[in-house]
């Protein structure tokens, strides 16, 4: 993801998430060496993106989203596989994430890729207020 991708990424972010991240958060991520962001394109159009953070031997999948018409076509799978490859190359031992308890699609996606529930973080989300499940996958 580069700053020229921000406009279409923000359109997707606002379409997909009721508690969308502000533009300032995306700009900070692009400037911070600990954070990385990748996009998936189809015919020159951004159809998905993912954001992750590496801190020492831990990585954190902070966001992954695919435009609705392009779901169930392995777009998120490709984004996640790319991230897993990078974080393993950087010697991370684990990848963590939070997901809304009601987000069945994302939970099924993460479970499919070997993430296991660790614990519940009470009232982690706003708009609407909801608990998060913290999930993790060990890396080789
Ligand atoms: C979660 C999300 C990113 C998955 O993206 P996607 O590109 O549709 O996922 P993929 O096509 O790569 O799915 C790979 C596998 O994950 C599982 N999976 C994905 N979506 C699923 C769903 N809705 N129901 C059940 N399993 C699902 C399946 O095993 C799927 O393989 P299959 O299609 O061969 O059965 C997408 O649904 C999305 O953008 N949701 C809204 C944003 C969001 O909630 N992000 C997560 C925030 S924590």
Image: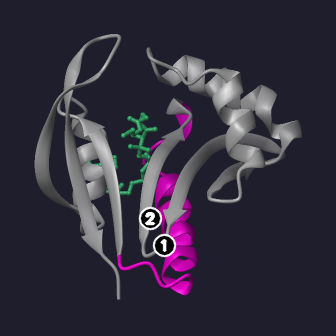
Residue furthest to the right: 4
Residue drawn at point x = 56 percent, y = 85 percent: 89
Residue 88 within the magenta-colored segment of the rendering: yes
In the foreground, 84 or 91: 91
In the picture provided, is 14 more to the left or to the right than 99?
Answer: right
Q: Position of residue 119 (x, y in %)?
A: 10, 48
Task: Give the residue pinned by disc 1.
Answer: 56
* Mark sitting on residue 100: none
Determine the secondary structure under disc 2.
Answer: strand
Residue 118 within the magenta-colored segment of the rendering: no
Residue drawn at point x = 35 percent, y = 10 percent: 127
In the picture provided, is 62 more to the left or to the right than 134?
Answer: right
Q: Position of residue 88 (x, y in %)?
A: 48, 82
CB within 8 Å, label 2 to label 1: no
Residue drawn at point x = 68 percent, y = 34 percent: 26
Q: Is the CB of the residue bearing disc 1 within 8 angstroms of ligand 1?
A: no
Vertical side of 51 occupied by 67: above or below: above
Instruction: Determine the main secondary structure of the stretch shown in magenta.
Output: helix
The residues bearing labels 2 and 1 have C-alpha atoms spaced at a distance of 8 Å
Determine the secondary structure under disc 1.
Answer: loop
In the foreground, 43 or 63: 63
Image quadrant where one finds the C terminus: bottom left
In the foreground, 4 or 69: 4
Vertical side of 102 occupied by 54: above or below: below
Task: Give the residue pinned by disc 2.
Answer: 59
What's drawn in magenta, residue-wise?
69-93
Q: Position of residue 61 (x, y in %)?
A: 44, 54
Q: Position of residue 75 (x, y in %)?
A: 54, 54
Residue drawn at point x = 62 percent, y = 20 percent: 22
């Amino acid at each position: 993801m580069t700053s020229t991708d921000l406009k279409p990424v923000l359109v997707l972010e606002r379409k997909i998430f009721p508690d969308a991240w502000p533009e300032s958060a995306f700009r900070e991520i692009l400037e911070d060496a600990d954070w990385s962001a990748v996009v998936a394109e189809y015919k020159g159009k951004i159809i998905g993106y993912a954001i992750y953070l590496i801190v020492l031997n831990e990585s954190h999948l902070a966001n992954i989203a695919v435009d609705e018409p392009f779901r169930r076509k392995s777009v998120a799978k490709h984004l996640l596989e790319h991230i897993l490859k990078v974080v393993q190359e950087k010697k991370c031992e684990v990848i963590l994430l939070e997901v809304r308890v009601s987000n069945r699609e994302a939970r099924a996606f993460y479970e499919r890729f070997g993430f296991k529930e660790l614990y519940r973080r009470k009232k982690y989300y706003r708009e609407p207020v909801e608990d998060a499940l913290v999930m993790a996958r060990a890396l080789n």
